[in-house]
Image (cartoon, rainbow, N blue to C red):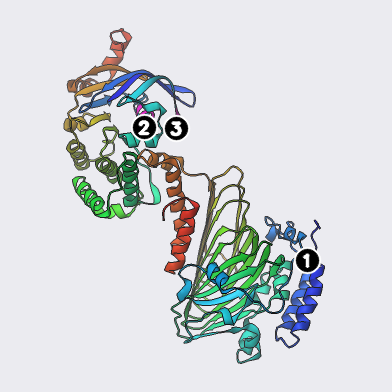
Amino acid sequence: MLSIKNIHASIDGKQILKGLNLEVKAGEVHAIMGPNGGGKSTLASVLAGRPEFEVTDGTAEFEGKDLLEMSPEDRAKEGLFLAFQYPVEIPGVNTTNFIKTALNEKRKYQGLQPLDSASFLKLLREKAALLELDKSLLSRSLNEGFSGGEKKRNEIFQMAVLDPKLTILDETDSGLDIDALRIVAKGVNTLRNESHAIVAITHYQRLLNYLKPDFVHVLMNGRIVKSGGKELALELEEKGYDFIKEELKEGLLLN
Amino acid sequence: MNTIHTDYLKDDFESLLSAQPDSALNGWRKEGFDNFTKLGLPTLKNEFWKYTGVARLFVKDYGVPGGECTIDESIIKKAAIPGSEDFNQLVIINGKYIPQYSNIQETEGIEICSLDEAAKGKYHDVVQEYFGKSGLFLKDGIYALNTSFFDGAVFILIKKNHTISNPVYFNHIFDTTQNHLLASPRSLVIVEENANVSLIESYCTNGSMDSLSNEVMEVVAKDNSHVEVYRIQNDQPTGSHVGTTHIRQVGKCFVNTVVVSMDGGMIRNNTNVIMEKEGNEAHLYGLYFLKGHTHVDNHTLVDNSKPRGLSNELYKGIMDEYSTGIFSGRILVRPDAQKIDAYQTNNNILISDKATVNTKPQLEIYADDVKCSHGCTVGRLDEEALYYLRTRGIDKDLAQAMLLKAFAEDIVNHIKVASVKDYVNKLIATRLNMED
């Protein structure tokens, strides 16, 4: 589904990703961990198409199409979804209207008719219930005055409505209390299926306890330096990243 | 001819006076023309006119309307705001109120007549007491020019304890099929105790030549009255406008004003609220969403002379193409005006490299126990918000339009007459190529 080869990316002339490779197949859940400044959020930005980042080398294919050639909106319409680490507050843009617009733009792209109001509202209600999202939030401006937890739940709510093929969770667990984390994880898990893949960027094991990733990758210095199963996350939780740094020094790891 | 010239106006003025020797208003007109002769047109050196070179409009010869005005009914219909059929509609052609084209739905609690008639009849004292008092605040040649040439002015009185359920609507039409037109609309609106009214104005130039409408509306709001004033400007680029809405809160009352400028030539809006009684409340809103070479200058004055007033100003501008937007907001707090709250905000978005914006707060505070704040921003669209919307599959153009619409709606939401609000929302949606 997603095939990243030798990606190099920079912002303001500063090289952040330095030859990153990653293969994600439909139905898989990948966790990406790593110390701060290693390039985790940059990876999310590059995949979603944030304009400030420049890809200087490498390729990224999504369902066989060149992802890097696409605008952020076309990536979304093709089925990529980024749950933001810091969702943006947009005063004056009504949450329901926004989601309706996004959904119908995607449907238009797929050659489908816009969803009629009744079906749309039914979908909205169903997904709001799944995320235990207070319905009053839907009639408010997008993310404006939402609590940290509400913003994160709203991200997963949007994901649920838009039904992407590939979801990137950019530190969705950060700033969540235990209950909110459980709700968010439940929301993500409900949407898991064999045709949907998830890339979860996280610092912590606790989200992974719910998501049970198939693969765990360590992203450091702009590259994935170690990959393993979910036991790798437990090892990291226990030992920190120092042992990986040691292994790197000893030349035991090569991407 | 390419130089600014106004000499010919003297002859026009003489003919105006000689055409109606019996007018009760000639004293004011003469004083006005004396002032105009003394002051001349304001130049950019005049602090009050720093950003708007209104004089340069006078490189052309303007015709001053005289005699009868006739116009095709279809033009009146076309000029009217959609949904205004139920309004108490005053048709104002070339600045003159034309009763036979007008359509006053309500007669209970409202008196509408020509100012001349009011000054000669039972409202003589009212006119004497309230007319022309805006001249104490507006001491420039362009104001004097209105006072010289106003003709067919309107007098409106909303009687005590009456709520006028349908808005009073000034449908201004300027006929420029024959010549460049200088129109001088003028009105005096008295809102008595416990009365409630909404005033709406729109402007439409019809013809291929240029118009300059130089308008003064004076509103006197008495105790416990409620006044809404909406001015919607969506004229052709050939239609220039200088308009003053001068509101005196002579009793403790509530005022809400919204000025929306979408299109036109050179536009200057003065919105003055003079708070003369303790505990007055006024809200001043403005939206200017400009393209082409349209130039809009919004000047506000909130004059606090008594304690415990509350004023809130919010003006927002979106400038595209070669347009220019200006906001200058003056808040005057006189020594006795303790414990007042006065807020002022001006936000601007430039969506073109060629557009210009100027913003200038002007606070003069002579009382020591007051709450005043002002803030202004000039910027571009929020890139973070744009990116966020795009990552949800919303095309860049549509995302941009959504953000601009949200920005503008902040002002539009203060229009309480549904059909006017719908109309403005449609204008905005059309400008943004959006479905409404």
Q: Which residue is mark 2?
A: A48
Q: Nearer the viewer, residue A56 or B270?
A: A56
Q: Secondary structure at mark 1?
A: loop
Image disc number at residue A51: 3
Question: Farthest residue toward the bottom?
Answer: B122
Q: Which residue is mark 1?
A: B40
Q: Secondary structure at mark 3?
A: loop
Q: CA distance from mark 3 to mark 1?
A: 54 Å
Mark 2 closeness class: few <14, some 14–19, many ≥20 residues within 10 Å: many
Residue A92 visible here: yes
- Residue at coordinates 66% horizontally, 70% vertically from top-left? B137
x, y percent for residue B392? 35, 40
Give left or right: position of A198 versus B32.
left
Q: Secondary structure at mark 2?
A: helix
Mark 1 closeness class: few <14, some 14–19, many ≥20 residues within 10 Å: some
Residue B360 visible here: no
Q: Nearer the viewer, residue A70 or B348?
A: A70
x, y percent for residue B413? 43, 62
- Residue at coordinates 48% horizontally, 56% vertically from top-left? B428
- Residue at coordinates 49% horizontally, 58% vertically from top-left? B427
- Residue at coordinates 45% horizontally, 48% vertically from top-left? B401
Q: Nearer the viewer, residue B160 or B430?
A: B430
Amino acid type for the residue under numbered disc 1: Gly
Q: In the rendered image, which quarter is residue A38 located in?
A: top left
Q: Chain of mark 2?
A: A
Q: Are marks 3 and 1 in contact (CB under 8 Å)?
A: no
Q: CA distance from mark 3 to mark 2?
A: 9 Å
Image quadrant in which the N terminus of chain B is located? bottom right
The verdict on residue B285 being magenta is: no
Q: Chain of mark 1?
A: B
Extent of the magenta region = A43-53
